[in-house]
Image (spheres, rainbow, N blue to C red):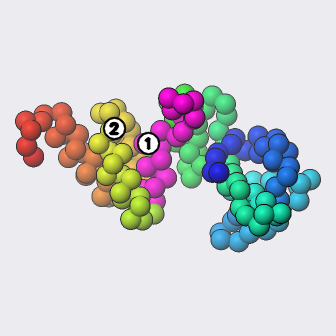
Amino acid sequence: MEFVVLRDDADHFRAILNDLEFFTVRDGILEHLPPSAHLHGDVWQVWGADMLCGRWRVDMMMEPGTPDRWIYKRDPTIQMARSAAVRVSETGIPYLAPINVMLFKAKYRRDKDERDFEIARQEFSAAEREQLIAWLDELHPGHEWIETLRIGGEWDAGSTGTR
């Protein structure tokens, strides 16, 4: 199971999941995290292992925000209300808004990220498209998605049914 918690809540979740052994994940290196050890500020991800079954069970990522504020961990100047950044599915499961997810995916642009972008961009509102363009302009000037979002926005706004 993969999920995100606020950094200040990480020890609480580790205590709840106390049947797992946790390991920090940094730069491809796993290190055991004893139950009594607190997370260092440079740890953004821990994995929880079910040692009896020999399986990873949890991939817990930390984020720097607050209950009311979402903060992008790669650039803390990018912030927004948590209520705008985190949505809730019809079944009650919270998930990160697609434009926020695309902001993370823009850095690496793996094949799966490109596929996700092609699907997600079709659902963006004009405001979301403009927000993602602004973020990409700031963090990844010249990124190919910027032009794709601009062209898509112009086409959506003045669509005649053809491109």
The local crowd at label 2, few if under 14, some if 14 to 19, many if 20 or more residues have their Cα within 10 Å, is some
- Residue 44 in magenta stretch: no
Horizontal and vertical percent position of residue 123: 32, 38
Q: Residue at x 33, y 48 (%)?
A: 119
Kind of residue at badge 2:
Phe
Q: Over which residues does the magenta segment extend?
A: 86-107
Q: Residue at x 71, y 56 (%)?
A: 57
Vertical order, 105 against 133 (above or below): below
* Image quadrant in which you'd find residue 130: top left
Query: In the visual, does 118 lie left or right of 37?
Result: left
The label shown at residue 163 is none
Horizontal and vertical percent position of residue 9: 76, 40
Q: Would residue 53 be visible to someone looking at this image? A: yes
Do the residues under discs 2 and 1 have CB atoms within 8 angstroms?
yes
**In 3D space, how far apart are the residues under numbered discs 2 and 1 (Cα atoms)?**
8 Å
**Residue reaching furthest right?**
36
User: Which element is circle 2 on?
Assistant: loop
Most foreground residue, 89 or 96: 89
First reached walking from the N terminus: tag 2 or tag 1: 1
Vertical order, 81 against 9 (above or below): above
Residue that carries the numbered disc 2 in the rendered image: 124
Horizontal and vertical percent position of residue 75: 55, 49
Query: In the visual, does 50 lie left or right of 105?
Result: right
User: Which element is circle 1 on?
Assistant: helix
The label shown at residue 98 is 1
